[in-house]
Image: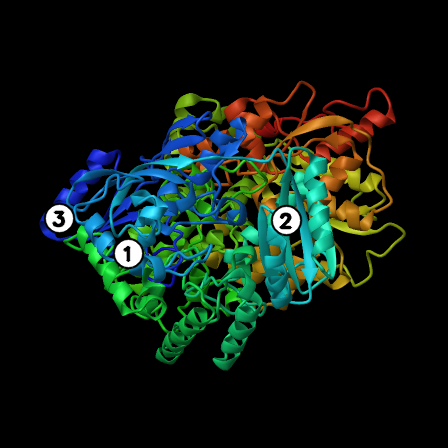
């Protein structure tokens, strides 16, 4: 599959290392009559990156920037080079590649050539065809051709074919800035330079296999400004777009309000144009944006010059290809008519007719896209699961093709025809021109081996639909999947293939997908795993269902970081899917040892606490032979150190230092009535998670110190008559022990009943535990109303201070910070309150994104150490190593602190610890340093120290 509605199962995938490998593949496939499909990032919307023969994946090895010539403004690239890597190399020279699709972080130059990709800056710098100088291709018969202008590299017979059809080439191709449909044979006209390389752009791998290309770079303006213009609706915005082109903008992008879930930061209106301007200085760029704003006749406007604010607005537009896959009511929407293009002056009228056609068929869609080029993108709520719905899909496609042609447009304005539109090309070009396409294809590929079924002799647009193989009834699952109607199949269908998870590097606040960035393998991306689950449900390729070893092995390196839950434009939640799979895969079967040792951590550590054997175990763990044996038995990676246990747990410290009766004590289940906690100070219940309780109680002690200083009264959750404690079930969730997780969580809800009845906030210090309670709990126990109540009661440490002590001023720490935002906090909880708290305490600087790589049990499990370390080396460890002396290393998660300690010998601290130390410093001499809030120094906390 790619990012389209189509699915074709290949015989195999080859990752060639050089052109000789490509030639060898072609020779073998030619001998056996096996088709060959060239694939870049696999983000094609029309199905052209799928095939039934051998797929060539260029992203693994043939992904180099061969050379860059700043003087000539050119670069030599291999087909698997990701666009962002080229942009990064060109930027120091003030250059860039002009076209920039929204998938720029994962699309490849070879794929861009195959689709003649464009992007938001095409009004200034054109399409990929405008930026290509030479293309080296291998034909299906193994001939290496270096194509360019003046018939360079033309196969035998191509010039004669063009010369015989000059009249048709001059009159049969619409003049549009975004005509991508069909073959660009008009590039072979003598007045256009007989440019063979340009004619290959947009041929979707059906004529030759690109092995190298020389591309043109353009000068990037030193400064940019962004004018955001508000209009009543998208038709009004579209009608205004063409009038802005004479002002020379870099972009004229449009999107409607029904695509924007939260319009905060946008000017008023029901649709917007994003018009970017450039200049030698910021003042010049702003002046051009102001000029456009005055000429725009918009309802409202906004000019943004701060780069970070511009990026935030552009992110809304770039994520639209994923966001649009869900209608506002949560129903699914699909590509298929993703990018038709009409003359820009006709776009307003076309959009009105398009909306009317949608209504006539009872369909809904959300237009957005390149309004300055007359090109819109849209996802439509086709029913592709039933024969009746597929029939309507065909009828709508045929009528829309006629509508586009009536407006003088092109069936494709950016993403190519593929299987989605090639069948309808005769409606646009006529049968004779389509026959000309077939004759050209025969000259390049006489055996029909290259990507058959695309562009000429096409497969039907309603064949090979990827949904046809899925079961028609929901499968029995443990989680509730409330956003997908309880249907696991619908949850898996969320992945539409836009492949944001395949971003090779991520230096911003994002997390997804750390395992892919560590291995570079498709099966370790969120998309790859979702597609394997799709095949598992289909049962054709993966035939053993939940017992599948292929799916298990792909999910094995999923860190359950939950990054995809927030970073994936369509909200794929692979951590939940992994937990679900492991639950079924190991049901009534022996599990890996780590599932018992690490998955049962709360049980083991409570036993240690009760028997007071932490000191003894710590000493034994320092004996090498015993430690190695214990790790081997427990399924723990040999490279890992066994963390040191606290000799005194947090709850025991609490009971020792607090009065046994009175305001501050651990509660017994059932003894709290509604309102009993309502006294002069606002009460909060501090959750004693397993890590705080048994491994780093200093975090809990510090939190108590700060919360009390902020005027709050701290309680611990109720305990059962037999000493049973609350637990979020995190370790059982991450190992897929969902039956146990349900039992533990139901017991927790029983214990927390009086707290929920009183409506008391629940403060959770460990981000992963807070995320489990806030997100996993209500999805696993969706039928229990108490689950939702506890979920809504959970607050992070910073959220508690912001909400329940808004007038409190934290101590002025006034130091720089480094470290990492916990991946679960990023994905589920958010860090707005944390950033505000750090700022008010004088903790300056930003924390890195990504994942620490330890991720709870993941980094401790045997076989995961190298991936775990690679993840840490991406952002966390470099940010800590480069931090200046005196920097506070903030890591609220126990896993993050442990990873830092074991890989870098650095102690990370929870924000509560830093603030508590600040309070002690403010209190005067003798109270600072590593002193604990209860007056006793930390002892035996291992990686927490």
Residue designated by label 2: 247
Q: Which residue is mark 3?
A: 30
For residue 252, above or below residue 109: below
- The quadrant in which the C terminus is found is top right
Which tag, 1 or 3, sits closer to the chain's start? 3
Name the side, left or right, on which 232 lies relative to 123: right
Count of numbered circles in the view: 3
The quadrant in which the N terminus is found is: bottom left
Q: Furthest-left residue in view?
A: 31
* 462 to the left or right of 731: left
| Residue shown at the point (21%, 36%) measured from the top left | 21
Q: In the figure, residue 253 lies in which quadrant? A: bottom right
Disc on the earlier residue, 2 or 3? 3
Q: Is residue 237 visible?
A: yes
Which of discs 1 and 2 lies nearer the camera? The answer is: 1
Front: mark 2 or 3: 2
Residue 220 locus on image (x, y percent):
55, 35
x, y percent for residue 53: 21, 53
Q: Badges 2 and 3: C-beta atoms under 8 Å apart?
A: no
Residue at x 41%, y 42% (from the top left corner): 594
Q: Give residue 166's mark.
A: 1
- Rendered image coloring scheme: rainbow
> Label 1, label 2: how many angstroms apart (C-alpha)?
35 Å
Query: Which of the two discs, 1 and 2, labels the residue nearer the N terminus?
Result: 1
SS label for mark 2: helix
Residue 767 image point, x, y percent: 62, 44
Q: CA distance from mark 1 to mark 3?
A: 33 Å
């Amino acid at each position: 599959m790619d990012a389209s509605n189509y699915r074709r199962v290949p015989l195999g995938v080859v990752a060639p290392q050089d052109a000789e490998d490509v030639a060898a593949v072609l020779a073998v496939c030619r001998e056996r009559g096996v088709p060959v499909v060239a694939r870049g990032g696999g983000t094609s919307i029309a199905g052209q990156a799928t095939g039934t023969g051998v797929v060539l994946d260029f992203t693994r090895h043939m992904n180099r920037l061969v050379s860059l010539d700043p003087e000539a403004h050119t670069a030599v690239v291999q087909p698997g080079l990701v666009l962002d890597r080229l942009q990064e190399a060109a930027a120091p020279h003030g250059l860039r590649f002009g076209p920039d699709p929204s998938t720029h972080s994962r699309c490849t130059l070879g794929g861009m050539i195959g689709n003649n990709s464009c992007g938001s800056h095409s009004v200034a710098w054109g399409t990929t065809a405008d930026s290509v100088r030479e293309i080296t291709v291998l034909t299906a018969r193994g001939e290496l051709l270096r194509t360019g202008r003046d018939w360079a590299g033309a196969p035998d017979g191509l010039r004669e074919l063009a010369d015989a059809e000059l009249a048709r080439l001059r009159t049969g191709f619409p003049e549009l800035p975004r005509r991508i449909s069909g073959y660009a044979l008009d590039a072979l006209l003598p007045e256009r330079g007989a440019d063979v390389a340009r004619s290959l752009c947009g041929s979707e791998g059906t004529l030759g296999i690109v092995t190298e290309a020389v591309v043109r770079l353009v000068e990037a303006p030193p400064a940019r400004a962004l004018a955001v213009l508000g209009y009543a609706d998208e038709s009004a915005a579209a009608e205004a777009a063409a009038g802005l082109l004479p002002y020379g903008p870099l972009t004229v992008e449009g999107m409607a309000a029904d695509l924007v879930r939260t319009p905060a930061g946008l000017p008023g209106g029901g649709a917007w144009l994003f018009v970017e301007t450039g200049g030698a200085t910021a003042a010049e760029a702003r002046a051009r944006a102001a000029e456009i704003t005055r000429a725009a006749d918009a309802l409202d406007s906004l000019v943004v010059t701060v780069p970070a604010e511009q990026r935030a607005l552009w992110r809304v537009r770039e994520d639209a290809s994923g966001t649009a896959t869900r209608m506002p009511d949560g129903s699914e929407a699909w590509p298929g008519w993703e990018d038709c293009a009409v003359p820009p002056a006709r776009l307003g009228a076309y959009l009105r007719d398009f909306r009317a056609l949608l209504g006539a068929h009872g369909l809904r869609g959300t237009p957005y896209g390149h309004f300055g080029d007359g090109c819109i993108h849209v996802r439509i709520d086709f029913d592709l699961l039933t024969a009746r719905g597929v029939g309507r899909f065909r009828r709508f496609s045929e009528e829309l093709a006629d509508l586009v042609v009536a407006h003088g447009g092109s069936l494709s304005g950016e993403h190519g025809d593929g299987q989605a539109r090639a069948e309808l090309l005769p409606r646009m070009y006529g049968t004779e021109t389509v026959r000309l396409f077939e004759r050209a294809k025969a000259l390049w590929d006489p055996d029909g081996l290259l990507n058959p079924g695309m562009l000429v002799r096409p497969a039907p647009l309603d064949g090979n639909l990827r949904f046809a193989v899925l079961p028609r009834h929901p499968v029995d699952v443990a989680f509730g999947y409330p956003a997908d109607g309880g249907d696991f199949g619908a949850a898996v269908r969320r992945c539409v293939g836009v492949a944001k998870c395949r971003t090779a590097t991520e230096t911003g606040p994002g997390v997804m997908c750390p395992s892919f960035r560590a291995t570079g393998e498709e099966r370790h991306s969120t998309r790859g795993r979702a597609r394997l689950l799709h095949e598992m449900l289909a049962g054709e390729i993966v035939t053993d269902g939940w017992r599948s070893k292929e799916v298990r092995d792909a999910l094995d390196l999923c860190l359950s970081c939950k990054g995809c839950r927030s970073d994936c434009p369509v909200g794929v939640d692979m951590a939940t899917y992994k937990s679900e799979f492991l639950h079924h895969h190991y049901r009534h079967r022996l599990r890996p040892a780590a599932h018992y040792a690490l998955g049962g951590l709360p049980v083991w550590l409570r036993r240690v606490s009760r028997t007071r054997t932490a000191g003894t175990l710590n000493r034994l763990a320092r004996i090498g032979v015993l430690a190695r044996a214990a790790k081997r038995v427990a399924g723990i990676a040999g490279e890992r150190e066994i963390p040191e246990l606290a000799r005194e747990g947090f709850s025991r410290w609490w009971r020792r230092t607090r009065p046994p009766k009175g305001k501050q004590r651990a509660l017994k289940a059932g003894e709290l009535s509604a309102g009993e906690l309502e006294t002069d100070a606002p009460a909060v219940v501090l959750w004693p998670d397993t890590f705080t309780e048994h491994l780093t109680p200093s975090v809990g002690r510090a939190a108590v110190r700060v919360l009390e200083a902020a005027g709050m009264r701290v309680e611990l959750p109720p305990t059962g008559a037999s000493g049973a404690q609350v637990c979020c079930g995190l370790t059982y969730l991450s190992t897929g022990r969902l039956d146990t997780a349900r039992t533990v969580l139901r017991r927790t809800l029983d214990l927390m009943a009086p707290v929920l009845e009183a409506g008391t906030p629940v403060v959770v210090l460990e981000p992963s535990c807070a995320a489990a309670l806030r997100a996993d709990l209500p999805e696993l126990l969706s039928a229990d109303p108490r689950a939702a109540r506890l979920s809504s009661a959970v607050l992070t440490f910073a959220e508690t201070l912001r909400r329940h002590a808004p007038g409190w001023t934290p101590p002025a720490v006034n130091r720089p910070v480094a470290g990492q935002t916990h991946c679960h906090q990023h994905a589920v909880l958010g860090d707005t309150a944390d950033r505000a708290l750090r700022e008010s305490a004088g903790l300056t600087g930003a924390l890195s994104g990504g994942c620490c790589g330890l991720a709870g049990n993941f980094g401790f499990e045997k076989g995961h150490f190298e991936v775990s370390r690679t993840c840490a080396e991406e952002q966390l460890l470099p940010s800590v190593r480069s931090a200046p002396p005196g920097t506070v290393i903030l890591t609220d998660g126990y896993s993050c602190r442990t990873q830092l300690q074991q890989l870098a010998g650095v102690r990370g601290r929870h924000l509560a610890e830093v603030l508590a130390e600040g309070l002690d410093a403010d209190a005067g001499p003798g109270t600072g340093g590593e002193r604990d809030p209860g007056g006793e120094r930390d002892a035996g906390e291992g990686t927490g120290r």
